[in-house]
Image (cartoon, rainbow, N blue to C red):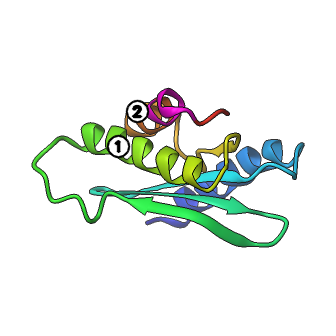
Amino acid sequence: MSLIIHNSKIRRSRRTRGALKSNPNLPRLSVFRSNQHLWAQIIDDQHAKTLVAASTKSDKSKATKTAKATTLGQNIAKLALEKNINRVKFDRGPYQYHGRIKALAESARQTGLKF
């Protein structure tokens, strides 16, 4: 990855996370996207602990990447609700709210997670 692209991603991440610091009491739903997989984790920034984590890496189905993202959103929301986490801040990082990121967020909302 070129240095210019790398620095652009870092700037976008900082801008997104800077907007999330307005309410430090809520945990943060952080998303990482690679070419093949998605990872999502709910992080308590005050204590620097990961509360819940899930990924599409263990999903061996032949579904599309967007369908796997929808399943991941449902899984992360169910795990969060089991631990009595109802509200989170959505940290999309340097990624646009589009495609797999949007599918994950909307399925988490439909399952009952509020952000």
- In the image, residue 75 lies at what x, y percent? 41, 49
Disc 2 target residue = 103
Q: Residue at x 50, y 63 (%)?
A: 53
User: How many neighbours does mark 2 have within 10 angstroms: few (below 14), some (14-19), or many (20 or more)?
Assistant: many
| Mark 2–mark 1 CB contact (< 8 Å) | yes
Q: Which residues are magenta?
A: 107-112
Outermost left residue: 62
Q: Residue at x 53, y 56 (%)?
A: 5
- In the image, residue 36 lies at what x, y percent? 27, 57
- In the image, residue 28 lies at what x, y percent? 69, 52
Q: Residue at x 47, y 65 (%)?
A: 2
Which quadrant does the C terminus fall into?
A: top right
- In the image, residue 108 lies at what x, y percent? 49, 37
Question: Can residue 110 be found in the magenta stretch?
Answer: yes
Mark 2 and mark 1: Cα distance apart in space = 6 Å
Foreground: 8 or 19? 19
Question: Can residue 111 be found in the magenta stretch?
Answer: yes
Q: Quadrant of residue 58?
A: bottom left
Q: Which label sits on residue 113?
A: none
| Position above or below: 91 against 96 | below
| Position above or below: 92 against 49 | above
Disc 1 target residue = 69
Per the image, label 2 sits on a secondary structure element best described as: helix
Q: Amino acid at mark 2?
A: Ala
